[in-house]
Every structure is written in C-alpha cells, then in structure tokens.
Amino acid sequence: MSNIAIIGEKEIVIGFSLIGFQLFPVTDSVEAKDALEKCTTDGNCQIIFITDNIAQLVIDEIEQYQRISPISICILPNRIQDSKLSIEMLRKNVEKAVGTDILFRKEE
C-alpha cells in the first residue's frame, strides 16, 4: 500500500488510483475529518494531498495536524476558482521544513 493518500471529491481522486495512491473519496466535512484522522493515525501515510474544496471544510483540523505531526499535508488547488489556501499551506510547509519562509519572503 502506498504511503501517499489523497482526500477529495470522488471524480477527482479516482484518477490517482492509477499511480497507487490511497484514495479517500469524501462528500462532506464529517467524512473528510474521518479520512484525515485515519491517514494521520494509521502511521503508514507520509504525504496527504487534499483537494481545495474539501480542505476549506476542515482547515482547522489540517492546521492542527500540521503543528503536531511530521506528515506533510498538501492542498491541491482548484483549477476553476482561485484560492489562496493552497499557496498559504505550501508556504507553511516550506517554513516548517526549512525554518524560514524562503519562497515568498519579501526582499528588504
């Protein structure tokens, strides 16, 4: 079983089965919270991708897991509507890994 999981809408996550991701198709925040908890507590997921629409439903839980867990949670941007959530999470992941914001810091 892959150590990479994807949580999101069924029509989006189904394609990732071809490359061996663990799939967690969800439709609401309750299912998303359950999937996120399963991915983080099983101990076999190291990277979790979550679609932007679903991430917005459980952003508090994502931020909590980001603080206490070594698992990397990445938000997949929505190609239809522009959301800053995925960029902000990427910035936080890089800052966590490197210790400083090397991607988006403003030059002084």
Image (spheres, rainbow, N blue to C red):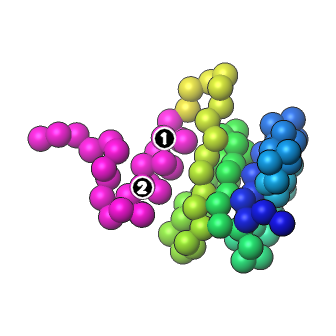
Q: Measuring from the top left, give residue 34's x and y in whole percent.
A: 81, 64
Q: Residue 62: which quarter of the image?
A: bottom right
Q: Secondary structure at mark 2?
A: helix
Callout 1–callout 2 Cβ contact below 8 Å: no
Which amino acid, by three-letter code, is at mark 1?
Answer: Ile
Q: Nearer the viewer, residue 16 or 80?
A: 16
Residue at screen point 61% across, 46% down = 75
Residue at screen point 81% across, 37% down = 12
Number of residues whose C-alpha sits closer than 10 Å to that of mark 2, classed few (under 14), some (14–19) or many (20 or more): some
Name, please, the residue furthest toward the top. Answer: 80
Residue beneath disc 2: 94
* Residue 29 visible within the image: no
Q: Quadrant of the N terminus?
A: bottom right
Specify the segment rendered in magenta: 84-108
Residue beneath disc 1: 87
Q: Secondary structure at mark 1?
A: helix
Please give left or right for residue 87 compared with residue 8 in the image: left
Please give left or right for residue 61 compared with residue 41 in the image: left
